[in-house]
Structures are given as structure tokens and as C-alpha cells.
């Protein structure tokens, strides 16, 4: 078996409402990760602008915007693939939350529109993402350096069906760029990412935004940070903790995916037909029958 290694740039920063500052941070992360040998750099969801629903709708960007052009130039100059892990993309008819893929020549080669929108209440606060963006309706795979990666965004991580579909379609690495809330992150972030890795015997790479501190903490909502890379056995390979701006290039040995899937062939045991049948109801409550 030929050895294959994918070097991925894991990133994290405090995203604010300031597009110019956030874009400069993103460009710097791309350049620094590429200089350290990254084949691909994953930027977090909402890393270019994190505000209220109204603010993010107003700040939605077209793919020919100056900010996206800056990232394209950084990818080209650095010779690395960039995944802008989720930005509010303004189209002719609506706004999508898109993980945009920029190749090493600086060309936009595709993207994934977030399928599962964060319509939830956390600590009494309502997050109605569907009031900002339109949901996507199709999973997406990415090929980089002979490796197949599954593209997802943040809240998607709570829907394991998506990740199983990506793994069954050949994904060896699952990307989960995020702006996870502080409250849900403390409770669920690591365990969800490790679960997605374990159940699919795949690497998981999850770049993230992090809440501000002190005088710069005027966030629309606090996000958790702890950008993670997880191995196909569920082991945490990298954790950027609560650093306000950080990156790490993580080497993903793809032979480990094959080895784990051979030793514990969960994907071979998937019974899609059985799952589509309504469950049999077995009544063991005698009191209901009297």
C-alpha cells in the first residue's frame, strides 16, 4: 500500500464584525500554514464576519468581492488549497452559508452549501439561521492530493446520517469548520467530533472561531474555540484551546483510515434497506392491555 499523507492547516481566531480585520487574519493564516507545508488550509465558519443575523445578512459577500479575491490571491501565492469553511454567500436570489473551495491556482472550483441550519434556542437565546440563509440540499466531496474529503459546516455535526453518507461515498477526512456557541461547545463539541470520527473510521478536522476577551468581547454571541483534529480511532490529535489566533499543520496518515476500516469494518455492515422500514412496536405494558 502506497503511503499517503495529507497536511491540513487547522485554524482558529476571534472573528468580529470587522470584515477587513478578519480577512487579513484569514490571509495570514493561509500564508503561514502554507509556509509550514499545508496541502490544504481550513478556515472556520463565519471567520470573515460574525455578528447578529441582521448584520451577517447585510454583510453577505458575493464570490467576486474584495475579501474573496484576497483569499484567492493568498491561495495562489501560497500554492495551497483553501476551504473558507463557511461564509454568507450572496447569490442572485438568496444567501447561502457556503464552504468555498479555492484551489492552489487561486481558482474557485466549487463549494458546499450548509444543509442543516442552526434554528435553535440556547440559554434563552434564539438562533434562527433560516432567517439569514437558505439551506443547501446536496452533500459534497472534495479531492485534494489523492485524498477524498467530506465538506460539512458546524451544526451539520449533529446529523450523523450526513457523515455516514460521505464516508460511504469515499470520504477519508471529514471537515467541520464551525462557529460553535460557548454553551453547546462546552457540553458537546469534542464528543460530537470524536463520535463522527469513530463511527466512520475517518479523520475529522474542525477549525473554529473563539469568543473575545476583555475589551474586545463585544461579540454577537460567544463561540467556543478548541479547533480540533481527531484521528480515525477517535483520538484528539490537535486542540487549539482558547487561543485568540492560532494555527497548526496536522499530518493525516491516510493508511490509518484503511487500517481502522479493515480491522473494524463498520461501513461494510451498514444496512440502509433495514433502516428505511418502520420499526416494529412490541407492547410489553400489560396494564395497557387490561
Image (tube, grey):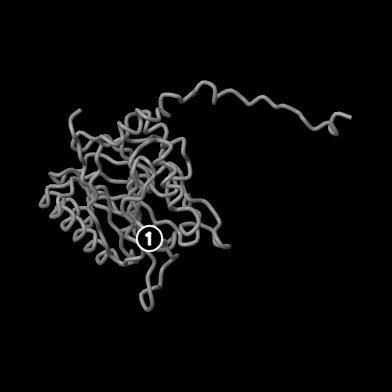
Is residue 276 depicted above or below 136 in this figure? above
Would you say 176 lies left or right of 40 here? right
Is residue 231 depicted above or below 223 in this figure? above
- Residue 218: image quadrant is bottom left
Q: Residue at x 37, y 47 (%)?
A: 235
Of all residues shown, which one is farthest toward the right?
A: 290
Q: Residue at x 37, y 41 (%)?
A: 233
Q: Nearer the viewer, residue 98 or 287?
A: 287
Q: Residues within 10 Å of mark 1 (few under 14, many from 20)?
A: many
Asked if residue 39 shows in the view, the reply is yes
Q: Position of residue 76 (x, y in %)?
A: 12, 49
**In the rendered view of the protein, which quadrant contains the N terminus?**
top left
Of all residues shown, which one is farthest toward the front?
A: 263
Q: Position of residue 265 (x, y in %)?
A: 40, 27
Under tag 1, what secondary structure?
Answer: loop
Name the residue carrying label 1: 225
Q: Nearer the viewer, residue 172 or 46?
A: 172
Would you say 284 lies left or right of 262 here? right
Q: Residue at x 37, y 48 (%)?
A: 97
Q: Position of residue 18 (x, y in %)?
A: 30, 67
Of all residues shown, which one is farthest toward the bottom?
A: 215
Q: Residue at x 89, y 30 (%)?
A: 290
Q: Position of residue 285 (x, y in %)?
A: 80, 32
Asked if residue 90 shows in the view, the reply is no
Amino acid at each position: 500500500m502506497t503511503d499517503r499523507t495529507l497536511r491540513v492547516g487547522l485554524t482558529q481566531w476571534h472573528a468580529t464584525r470587522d470584515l477587513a480585520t478578519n480577512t487579513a487574519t484569514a490571509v495570514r493564516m493561509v500564508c503561514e500554514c502554507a509556509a509550514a507545508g499545508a496541502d490544504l488550509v481550513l478556515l472556520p465558519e463565519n471567520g470573515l464576519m460574525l455578528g447578529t443575523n441582521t448584520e451577517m445578512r447585510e454583510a453577505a459577500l458575493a464570490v467576486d468581492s474584495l475579501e474573496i479575491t484576497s483569499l484567492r490571491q493568498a491561495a495562489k501565492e501560497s500554492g495551497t488549497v483553501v476551504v473558507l469553511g463557511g461564509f454568507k454567500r450572496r447569490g442572485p436570489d438568496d444567501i447561502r452559508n457556503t464552504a468555498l473551495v479555492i484551489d492552489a491556482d487561486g481558482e474557485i472550483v466549487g463549494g458546499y452549501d450548509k444543509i442543516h441550519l442552526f434554528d435553535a434556542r440556547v440559554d434563552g437565546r434564539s438562533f434562527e439561521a433560516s432567517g439569514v440563509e437558505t439551506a443547501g440540499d446536496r452533500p459534497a466531496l472534495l479531492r485534494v492530493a489523492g485524498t477524498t474529503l467530506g465538506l460539512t459546516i458546524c451544526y451539520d455535526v449533529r446529523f450523523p446520517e450526513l457523515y455516514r453518507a460521505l464516508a460511504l461515498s469515499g470520504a477519508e477526512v471529514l471537515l467541520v469548520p464551525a462557529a460553535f456557541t460557548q454553551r453547546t461547545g462546552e457540553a458537546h463539541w469534542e464528543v460530537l467530533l470524536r463520535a463522527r470520527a469513530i463511527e466512520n473510521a475517518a479523520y475529522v478536522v474542525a477549525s473554529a472561531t473563539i469568543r473575545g476577551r476583555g475589551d474586545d468581547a463585544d461579540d454577537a454571541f460567544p463561540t467556543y474555540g478548541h479547533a480540533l483534529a481527531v484521528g480515525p480511532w477517535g483520538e484528539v490529535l490537535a486542540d487549539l484551546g482558547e487561543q485568540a489566533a492560532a494555527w497548526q499543520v496536522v499530518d493525516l496518515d491516510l493508511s490509518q483510515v484503511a487500517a481502522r476500516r479493515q480491522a473494524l469494518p463498520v461501513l461494510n455492515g451498514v444496512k440502509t434497506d433495514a433502516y428505511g422500514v418502520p420499526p416494529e412496536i412490541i407492547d410489553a405494558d400489560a396494564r395497557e392491555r387490561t
